[in-house]
Amino acid sequence: VQSTGTFQNSNGPRIIVGILNDNKQNADVLNSGFRVVASAATGDEIVKDSFMELKVDELIVEIMSIHKNPGIQSLYDAIRVLLTPDDNRVLASQVS
């Protein structure tokens, strides 16, 4: 929790989404970037909200259309984490 708070307070989500946007063709950078998204958002609703406000969902759809078979595997982990309400500190998750 402390490290994701630091990530959030240091504009981590904005930096990661910027890197992903700048490297849409680079599968290695995308794979690493979406691993960070999945790790940072796990169990932290505030970080999830930050990624969603930065329109990571639209970016995910765009990247899925660019990188088809086999695609970016960590992207699917990021989707799963972003859609899982796993932060017990938040009374009502925004995940639906």
Image (cartoon, rainbow, N blue to C red):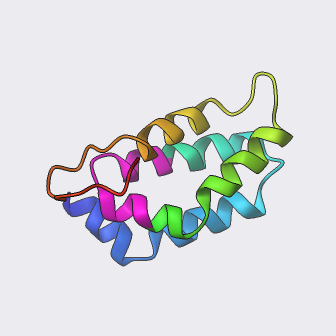
Quadrant in the rendering for residue 67 = top right
Please give left or right for residue 63 compared with residue 96 in the image. right
Q: Main secondary structure of the magenta part?
A: helix
Quadrant in the rendering for residue 59 = bottom right
Q: Is residue 55 magenta?
A: no
Query: Could you tell me which quadrant the N terminus lies in?
Result: bottom left
Foreground residue among 94 and 22: 94
Residue 81 position (above or below residue 57): above
- Residue sitting at 36 percent across and 67 percent down? 7
On the image, the x and y values in percent for residue 80 come to 46, 36
Residue 71 position (above or below residue 5): above
Q: What segment carries the magenta color?
A: 36-49
- Residue sitting at 45 percent across and 68 percent down? 50
On the image, the x and y values in percent for residue 63 come to 76, 46
Number of marks in the image?
A: 0
- Residue sitting at 67 percent across and 48 percent down? 60
- Residue sitting at 14 percent across and 57 percent down? 89
Foreground residue among 2 and 80: 80
Residue 50 position (above or below residue 63): below
Foreground residue among 84 and 44: 84
Foreground residue among 11 and 59: 59
On the image, the x and y values in percent for residue 34 come to 56, 46
Quadrant in the rendering for residue 48 = bottom left
Please give left or right for residue 88 compared with residue 15 in the image. left
